[in-house]
Image: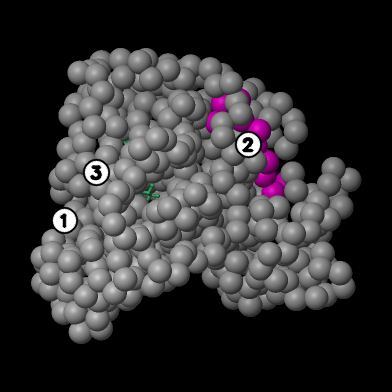
Amino acid sequence: MRQERPANAMRNTHLLVNGFDYVRTPSLPEALAALAERPEAKILAGGTNLLVDMKLENERPARVIDITPLAALAGIEATSDGIRLGALTRIRSLAVDQGLWKERTALAEAAESFGSTQVATMGTLGGNIANGSPASDTVPTLVVFGAEAVIAGPGGERRVLVADLLDGPGTVALEPGELITAVLLPTASGRGTIGSAFLKLSRVTADLAKVSVAVRLVRDGDRIVDTRIALGSVGPTVIRAKRASAMLSGGPFSEDVILDAARIAAEEISPIDDVRSTAAYRRRAAVALVHDALCVAWKRAKQGVPAMPRGKAVAPLRRDLRPIRLAADETATIELAVNDETIELDVAPNELLLNVLRERLELTGTKYGCGIGECGACTVWVDGAPVLGCLLLAVSADGADVRTIEGLTAPDGTLHPIQQAFIDKNAFQCGYCTPGMLMMTAKLLEEIPAPTEAEIRDYLKGNHCRCTGYASIVRAVESLADRRCDGGAKAKRGGDRDASAV
Ligand SMILES: Cc1cc2nc3c(=O)[nH]c(=O)nc-3n(C[C@H](O)[C@H](O)[C@H](O)COP(=O)(O)OP(=O)(O)OC[C@H]3O[C@@H](n4cnc5c(N)ncnc54)[C@H](O)[C@@H]3O)c2cc1C
Ligand code: FES
Ligand code: FES
């Protein structure tokens, strides 16, 4: 007899308990054909929503279509009429793109605000839209920029405003068999200069928004030519504050006017009480956030944009990925280069890289913590990028170069300087989070050789430590940056020494 699960029971976040067919293809027509065969199949991009939902059994797709080999769907490109963002562009790449910071600041800011560096490295723009969450950070900014989604499907290609795709919590208006291939950000024309801003209020830095606000404003002298305001996490979808925008557009800018507009915007939302906040708090916070975002956008329209965060875009796919098609009860032989050793093994579609590393290759340095992307204990490098082993299908990693904490130590057992720094600065107690912290620290120092404390805390925000506290961890990382700064000079933003010195 089937046992019903009690409503408050924990799901198994360690495993993907249900089976599914797996299709991976480097060809868009083949991906669409695989989708047409089973329109209820799920597209897999970064997997940071889908695999969490599958682990929690909120989703039980019969087929998963892995589109990550579609390299043509990734990238940021300036076109004659705007900017084209491939659907597979990683969120982190948006956060560190100079052109976006300059031209579409609010979108880059939204990407920068993402919950963790690893999630932003894995997560894609297309996934952030298609997931349909009212808390999706990029969506309010896409709405205020008038972005269009390019959609491919059985009927060919169509374009639709991102605002018109928003259907309700967890759904978007895609027809069966369709997928998003790109997002187009149109170039603005007309009088005035543009400023934009994205502000997010969350419980802690590494979290989804309680309330978020995106503003795009056109300024001409002391007048507002046009304003668009959109809010996240305050209704079933991202909501446009149309009355507030209309009230501002065409009038003078003043403290009283923007406060009135912010109050009107707060009347246009429909927040609820949930685990992250209460409806009443959200409504009050919305007033402050809309007010502040309008101020920031107004200033930027005159003074220009803030300094871009330092860091590197996620490298484009270098692997020549072969197509794979597997039934749920079949296995594929995959090849991985793990810590410089080539390994072949048979995996089923629902095996995770973390489980393969720990249980089949006995590389137990990589830890299982939460299983749903929140703690960073399972961080490994795949093709040089820091990713979460608990949210990556082993079969998706076929052909990849994988490095684990065991590969950070030299073959003769000499500790990596980062490991030594953690010992010297007492940067661990139980050590459970330490492998993830070390793998992230190494990537941080590769991207930003002399990080500031704020940069260290931001880069490591997806790595949770439950017993040491963060002060000594930050000190350990700073000590490495200091060494590269000629004998202990404090690391400064803009430091440009070679990471290989670590
Ligand atoms: C710990 C954690 C922190 C997070 N923090 C944030 C945050 O701060 N802000 C935020 O906005 N989100 C956050 N997220 C949610 C998630 O990371 C983002 O929504 C991400 O952009 C999803 O992209 P993905 O490529 O991983 O999507 P996937 O998980 O691969 O897919 C998500 C959904 O979209 C569908 N899909 C994916 N790509 C396409 C496509 N091209 N066409 C059609 N359908 C498609 C999939 O079938 C699935 O239903 C967080 C998630 C985790 C686990
Ligand atoms: S176990 Fe992967 S993030 Fe926690
Ligand atoms: S050292 Fe124990 S969890 Fe970080």
Q: CA distance from mark 1 to mark 2?
A: 37 Å
Quick check: 63 left or right of 376?
Answer: left
Check disc 3 and give the amino acid type. Answer: Val
Q: From what the image shows, is residue 231 above or below residue 408?
A: below
Could you tell which of marks 3 and 2 lies nearer the N-terminus?
3
Query: Within the image, what quadrant is residue 107 found in?
Result: bottom left
In magenta, the rendered stretch is 397-406
The residue that label 3 is drawn on is: 162
Could you tell which of marks 1 and 2 lies nearer the N-terminus?
1
The residue that label 2 is drawn on is: 383
Relative depth, front residue between 46 and 62: 46
Check disc 2 and give the amino acid type. Answer: Asp
Q: Tell whether position 398 is magenta.
A: yes
Disc 3 to disc 2: CB gap under 8 Å: no
Q: Nearer the viewer, mark 3 or mark 1?
A: 3
Counting from the top left corner in percent of width and height, residue 83 is at 40, 41
Tell me the SS state at disc 1. Answer: loop
Q: CA distance from mark 3 to mark 1?
A: 15 Å
